[in-house]
Amino acid sequence: MNQQTMYVLFQFAILIAIFYFLLILPQQRRQKKEQQMLDSLKPGDEIITKSGFYGKILNIKDDVITLEMGADKVRLKIAKWAVGGIISSASDKIENDQK
């Protein structure tokens, strides 16, 4: 291989490294963090769905979550992947009640 070919291969390797560190690695970290959040869900947690609905988890069975929502305590089943975040955890409420 001549010097020009080596230079092109080096630039290509640098480009791949940049894509990995700026695009792929952060996406993998976000996915891992979201999976940890989904795995930590338990009945009693108050959550917000990705579509903006607030509710309290009543039951979790496989990939289906039963929520209680609103003043009328409407029950709604959603897919586990639709959970956007935890507003307050059931364990946080127990700790606050004990204080």
Image: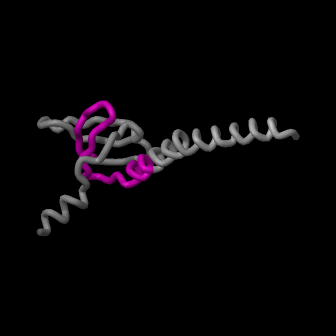
Q: Where, by quadrant of the figure, is residue 4 drawn?
A: top right
How many marks can you see? 0
- 81 sits to left or right of 7: left
Q: Residue at x 75, y 39 (%)?
A: 7
Q: Position of residue 15 (x, y in %)?
A: 63, 38
In the displayed orientation, state which residue is furthest to the front: 3
* Whether residue 70 is situated above or below residue 61 in the rendered picture: above
Q: Quadrant of residue 77?
A: top left
User: Whole-percent x and y of residue 45?
Assistant: 26, 51
**Camera-side residue of 27 and 93:** 27
Q: Which residue extends farthest top? A: 51
Rendered position, 51 above or below 48: above
Identity of the residue drawn at 33% across and 34% down: 50
Q: Position of residue 84 (x, y in %)?
A: 33, 40
Task: Write the residue at 52% across / 41% down.
Answer: 22
Image quadrant occupied by the N terminus: top right
Q: Residue furthest bottom?
A: 99
Which stretch did the figure color magenta? 33-57
Placement of the C terminus among the 4 image quadrants: bottom left
In this rendered view, identify the residue nearer to me: 75 or 48: 48
How far across and down, in percent of the image, does residue 81 sit? Answer: 41, 39
Position of 76 with respect to 29 (left or right) is left
Residue 40: say if magenta: yes
Q: How is the image coloured?
A: one colour
Residue lying at the far right in this picture: please name it.
Answer: 1
Answer with the quarter of the image where residue 98 lies: bottom left
